[in-house]
Amino acid sequence: MGRYVARRLLQMIPVFIGTTLLIFLMVYALPGDPVRGLFGDKGGSEATIAALRREYGFDQPILVQYFNYMKDMVLHADFGTQVASGRPVTEILGEAFPVTVRLAAIAFTIEVILGIGLGVIAGMKAGKLADTLILLFSLLLISVPVFVLGFIFKTVFAFQLGWLEPNVNDSMNMGELLMPAIVLAAVSLAYVGRLTRTSVAENLRADYIRTAVAKGLPKRRVVGVHLMRNSLIPVVTFLGTDIGALMGGAVITEGLFNIQGVGGTIFDSIQRREGTTLVGLVTVLVLIYLAASLIVDLLYAVLDPRIRYA
């Protein structure tokens, strides 16, 4: 197990370098200049602009900028400075990430509980009315774009019924984060439900389930231990990869509900062509995604004891 974890950690290094380099190149390929953007329509003197470009290292070749950025990040945990505000990127990360982590955690909890719950019901009732209704519900969630779903939720539950706040004024208030979390989790919830439903329906016909029933085991043990343990393997794989997607996919949801998290900061960084801020945010997202993938792989051995790591 230890050698497997060490090998996976080593494999993360080229993935980490490749991802950050791609983001770095993408940002600097965009038109516009973050330094000139500071002065707006009035513009600044060429001498001032050149001095600022030299200060932020923008006068260096792109690969030199990337090398210096990575060196400061790895050796000093320095993610650079945001051009627009002059603040350290680590300070911006420290403000934005906790907000999005709270939002993603609520969305993930909803996704797991409702997605697996509905999937188990549909799988156990395959071909019956409950299965059909859950299938239609999941297709509806997948078909409706996130921004349309968010607009419907705000109109119905905030403006018409007055049950919830239309926007998030306090990111520490879990009640205010509930509606955007449901919107963020909606599509993933539908996929988890369909994955669970298919896996449960297939495993119900497996020999080991028939054997467990023939041995006279209680239904609760057959379903809770034998059926769920094998049926959850593909679902856990999806859930692991979806953690990163929830964190990064909050751009639209955070914009809809006026949440000042990672999504909103990424959107602002792209608009302002703030390469250092954007790379810093994406770097942390990549690390979260890689860590989640590693945890998922390790969970396989818990769910299926036949799996062993060299």
Image (cartoon, rainbow, N blue to C red):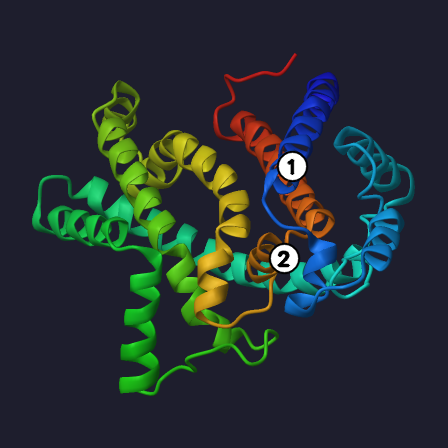
At which x and y percent is residue 156?
Answer: 27, 78
At which x and y percent is residue 176?
Answer: 49, 77
Q: Is 78 displayed left or right of 113 in the figure?
A: right
Q: Is 238 displayed left or right of 191 in the figure?
A: right
Position of the N terminus by quadrant:
top right
The local secondary structure at tag 2 comes to helix
Q: Residue at x 50, y 71 (%)?
A: 177
At which x and y percent is residue 76?
Answer: 91, 43
Instruction: Give the residue number, with chain letter if any, for mark 1.
Output: 291
The answer to whether residue 162 is visible is: yes
Position of the C terminus by quadrant:
top right
Identify the mark nearer the N-term, 1 or 2. Answer: 2
Number of labels in the image equals 2
Q: Which mark is residue 169?
A: none
**Is 121 or 10 nearer to us in this picture?**
10
Are the residues flagged by discs 1 and 2 in contact, CB closer than 8 Å? no
Instruction: Give the residue number, with chain letter if any, for mark 2.
Output: 272
